[in-house]
Image (cartoon, helix red, strand yellow):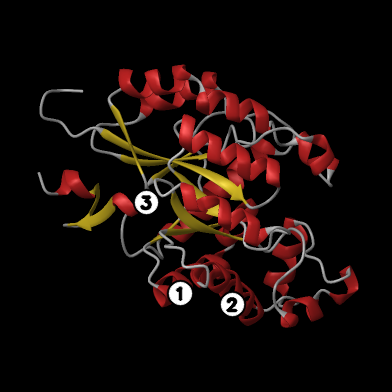
Amino acid sequence: MSAGAQPACLIVNADDYGYYDCVSRGILRSARHGIVTATGIFATGKRFDEHIAWLSDYEELDLGLHLNLTDREPLTKEMRSRLARRGGRFPPKFAVAMAVMSGAIPVPAVRLEWRAQIERCLDKGLSISFINSHEHIHMLPPLFRLAGELAREYGIAHVRLSASDGLRNWRPGAFVRDALMKGLAIHNRRQLPQPVPAFLGMAESGRLSLAALRTLLPRMQPGGVYELMCHPGYRVDAEIDNPMLFNYHDWQGELDALTSPLARELLIAHGIRLIGYRDLEHRSGKLVARDAANQ
């Protein structure tokens, strides 16, 4: 980085806080002893109250909403009634996408459900800086529009624009997913009134490693603002009620990478500054870290 240039700024954002105890505990360890700076709250978790209580000792952690429409049970009667044939549980993401696009799950019903999830967190007195979603379901165009409307309604400043980060991933389904997310990002970007952080971590989603960090971090440009998605956690097999999740998630591997001293050394070596979403502001059409904006 040249003299006088602003550093690249990075939000390291852990998805799924509240999903399982072992995931929440891993995220908190990654914040206290690693490089995680933000986490999205899974407001439909089974032990929501307990997980929110754990956050009281982590004021340094930036908080957002990890809106859910693809896993476990909804909060609202309206949504449960529409899912009665499935026992009142959300279907998998592709079934949800088809249901939303066909009108079987209408956007007004999603609005009610997502409002309930947001208000469940706000009722706990949490300060919410951003919105994203479980399995990126908010990237479906009508839901991305809805997420933006809800963000404005509740005064939430940022909505994640999930996108391919350009790294190749040949795991089954990953190539198709990344191509789809690239197209959705191009479409949804038109709805954004302001710039958003460049998104990293899609190719390595569920299995972020030190090797991936060594590839991604040098690509960050001075003065740029980036968000790195991650999924740290402890591996506790007895807690995980869906064994299929192990096909996607290496929670322990991500936890080890994000808390490794080498991760912080890489940030220092590349002149990258860690921030949260709450540190950002828009100035003259640009997205900048707040204290840097005043220099």
Is residue 189 rendered to the left or right of residue 239? left
The quadrant in which residue 92 appears is bottom right
Nearest-to-viewer mark from 1 and 3: 3
Residue 266, percent from left and from top: 39, 19
Q: Which badge, 1 or 3, is on the more N-terminal residue? A: 1
The residue at 65%/60% (across/down) is 48
Q: Earlier in the sequence, mark 2 or mark 1?
A: 2
Amino acid type at circle 2 is Arg
The answer to whether residue 145 shows anywhere in this view is yes
Quarter occupied by the N terminus: top left
* Disc 2 packing (10 Å; few <14; some 14–19; many ≥20): some
Spatial CA distance of label 3 from label 2 is: 24 Å
Q: CA distance from mark 2 to mark 1?
A: 9 Å
The image shows residue 93 at horizontal and vertical percentages of 72, 57
Give the CA distance from mark 1 to mark 3: 18 Å
Q: Mark 3 falls on what kind of element?
A: helix
Identify the residue at horizontal 40%, vertical 66% (top origin).
156
Residue at x 60% of width, y 29% of height? 254
Q: Amino acid at mark 1?
A: Glu
Q: Is residue 231 left or right of residue 157?
A: right
Residue 149 disc label: 1
Q: Pointer 1: residues within 10 angstroms few (<14), some, or many (20+)?
A: some
Residue, disc 2: 111
Residue 196 visible from this viewpoint: no
Please tell me how crowded label 3 is: few (under 14), some (14-19), or many (20+) other residues with Cα within 10 Å. Answer: many
Q: Secondary structure at mark 2?
A: helix
State which quadrant residue 98 falls in: bottom right
Judging by the rendered image, the residue that carries numbered circle 3 is: 277
The mark lying in front, picked from 3 and 2, is 3
